[in-house]
Amino acid sequence: MSTSLNPNAFTFAKRLIENGEIDNNAGHWGEQNPDAAEENSFLQEHEYEVYSNWHLGLDMSKGEHTKARYKFPYGDFRTVHRQGLTAAKQRAAQQGYMDIEKAADKLLQLLEKQTRANP
């Protein structure tokens, strides 16, 4: 498999959660995640390295400076979304990416702990 966990994104998401930069709103991730226009706008202002921090998966078979390389988004370029992590965990499990599934689960547990500590 050419897709594996993006360790920098995991660390970045963990730091965001610890800093309380989270969105716990219920809803469908498909309605909350950035669309192609928002991604393009973000990339006009940031490098791909920054963009990659918002994706738990890296597909090394895709070009380094392409959006296709980055899989399993979990946030909106500002906050970590519970629904984004849940979607990433479920999709990773369905596709057999156990490392990404486990990372998303750890982040969900941390998000839950942070939510309980700071209601």
Image (tube, rainbow, N blue to C red):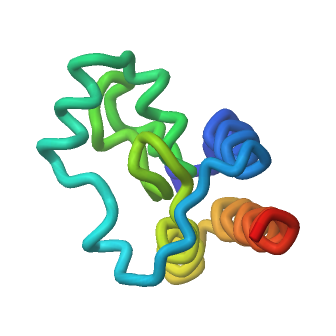
- Given residues 62 and 85, the one toward you in this image is 85
Can residue 102 be seen here? The reply is no
Q: What is the residue that sits farthest to the front in this orientation? A: 119
Residue 97's quadrant in the figure?
bottom right
Give above or below for 107 relative to 78: below
Q: Position of residue 59 (x, y in %)?
A: 45, 44
Left or right: residue 110 compared with residue 93: right
Q: Position of residue 72 (x, y in %)?
A: 46, 58
Give above or below for 113 relative to 40: below
Q: Report the quarter where the N terminus lies.
A: bottom right
Left or right: residue 69 compared with residue 54: left
Residue 103's quadrant in the figure?
bottom right
Q: Residue at x 29, y 43 (%)?
A: 68
Q: Residue at x 28, y 30 (%)?
A: 42
- Given residues 95 and 37, the one toward you in this image is 37
Q: Report the quarter where the C terminus lies.
A: bottom right
Q: Position of residue 114 (x, y in %)?
A: 80, 63
Total labels: the figure holds 0
Q: Position of residue 67 (x, y in %)?
A: 29, 38
Give above or below for 38 relative to 48: below
Give above or below for 112 relative to 100: below
Q: Residue at x 56, y 76 (%)?
A: 86
Q: What is the residue that sits farthest to the left in this orientation? A: 37
Q: Residue at x 35, y 18 (%)?
A: 46
Can residue 80 be seen here? The reply is yes
